[in-house]
Image (cartoon, rainbow, N blue to C red):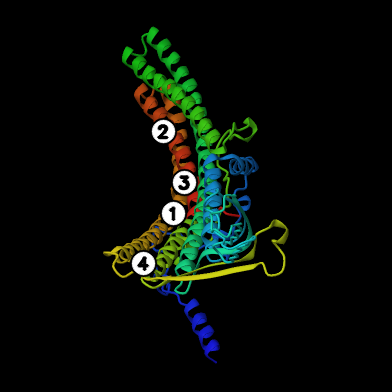
Amino acid sequence: MRKSLSLATIGLLAGCNMAPHYVRPAMPVPATMPEGLAYAPNADGTMAAADVAWRDFFIDERLRQLIALALANNRDLRIAVANVAQARAQYRVQRADLFPTIGLNGSATFVRTPPGLGGVAGGTGTGTDTGNGSGASGAGAGAGTGTDAGAVATSASRYDIYEASVGVSAWEIDLFGRLRNLTEAAQEQYFATEANRDGARVALVAQVATAWATMAADQDRLRIARDTEKAFGETLEITRGRAREGIASDLEVRQAQTSYEQARSDIASGMTAVAQDKNALDLLAGTSVPSDLLPDALGSSDATVANLPAGISSQVLLRRPDIAAAEHQLRSANANIGAARAAFFPNVSLTAAFGTLSLGLSGLFGNGSTNWSVAPSVSLPIFDFGRNRGNLHYAEATRNAMISTYEKAVQTGFREVADALARRGTISEQLDAQVALEQAAHVAYAIAQGRYTEGVDPFLTTLDSQRSWYTAQKSLVSTRLERQANAVELYRALGGGLK
């Protein structure tokens, strides 16, 4: 009965956990995404963005291949993967402390005693003195020959001791959950690193898509600048010809040349931008991007699906990798509090060995050579001058900081999604207006050009119309790029890009 009660007590103590009960903090954001004039109506469909694979979201085959290339070669992503491997190894090291480390030991000791320090014998004849010992400390034997005069033996003595054992050294019996909490903390750190790797993957997908669209837009801007340079060049030649005939003034020639030189400058700037865009894509892809995967124009078509479910509830934010990582960090800090609390209680450890001991190698595993030892120990801090209390306060402060970090991550995610939704709600109308503006500017330029040729309007009217059309074309490209970037950002902010 007493033995059963002792075992039950040990079992209850082994189940102790000093860590606070974990409760996920309430989300410090509204329960639903914002609504209003700036926000588009919620898209139909029940599938969340996180369930939409990136291969399904991006519909341009060249962009798909480029994203796959980046996922295979990007160095930042490789670093994130290596960090996961490091965290997993550290978790396994910490978890191993929960179990005893069993070791096999073998030893042989050879002792020679010099003459004069051997055994002493009295009387006549020959006397033998033999001593055997067993235990953790070893064994010994001695022999000597003496005379009836009691003289000290002059022969040397030799001792050979052989030992083999299997044992456990200083295994901490986790009665108060210190090791279990440290293991849980390491596991949560491992999970947080995995979430950070997922976040790096999502960010990489979005960065590649945005950089690809940016290069496509810069290709459009470069083409517009070249077309405009040609048109401005023709206008400049016409104006110079009219000036030679006395119809146009030198001021009109200089005005036409100003527009022409501006277009030339934009061409040089556009060529630089395209080259830098290529360099950015090479860095993201981790290798030189083949030319057949590069965009030639942004155009009016989309590289992504037209609509993406908005996700009315703020709970969709919990699927973002950065928020998941913040929560794992919080769980790890919570477990560290349990380990710090357990340090106030006794530390129980066990050292034990079982083996065999013999004076001869041939008898090492013979009958009667069994050797064992058990050495439990208990240590309890009495005066540590505030060390354990300081560690506990540090763990609690870290937990409080992790709560704020988690809440900040949720608020940041909510703001990013809300911003993307606000932009999505108005970008289509802005794009329609920009298309109409570009068309109107084009028609106005054609009319002004005709009226100038007929001598109805002054050259300045034609020049202003030409500049307005050039500006409208560039603005249209920028708006189309913003629409593509907004679609990618909304997909990322809602947690898409993992599949």
Q: Which mark is residue 387?
A: none
Depth check, mark 4 against mark 2: the one in front is 4
Q: CA distance from mark 2 to mark 1?
A: 26 Å
Q: Are marks 1 and 4 in contact (CB under 8 Å)?
A: no
How many numbered markers are drawn? 4
The residue labelled by disc 3 is 431
As displayed, is residue 443 above or below residue 235? Answer: below
Residue nearest the viewer, comparing 292 with 4: 4
Out of 239 and 79, give the one closest to the viewer.
Answer: 79
- In-front residue for pair 42/370: 370
Q: Tell me the SS state at disc 3.
A: helix
Residue at which label 4 appears: 28
The quadrant in which the C terminus is found is: bottom right
Coordinates of residue 127 in the picture (x, y in percent): 62, 62
In this view of the protein, which residue sits in the foreground, 64 or 367?
367
Amino acid type, residue under disc 1 in the picture = Ala
Task: Please tell me the numbered disc located at residue 420.
Answer: 1
The residue at 60%/65% (across/down) is 132
Residue on which the image places disc 2: 471
How many C-alpha atoms fall within 10 Å of the one at disc 1: few (<14), some, or many (≥20)?
A: many
Q: Earlier in the sequence, mark 3 or mark 1?
A: 1
Q: Residues within 10 Å of mark 4 (few under 14, many from 20)?
A: few
Mark 3 touching mark 1, by CB under 8 A? no
The amino acid at mark 4 is: Pro
Q: Secondary structure at mark 1?
A: helix
- Residue 365 is left or right of residue 22, and the answer is right
Q: Earlier in the sequence, mark 2 or mark 3?
A: 3
The answer to whether residue 455 is visible is no
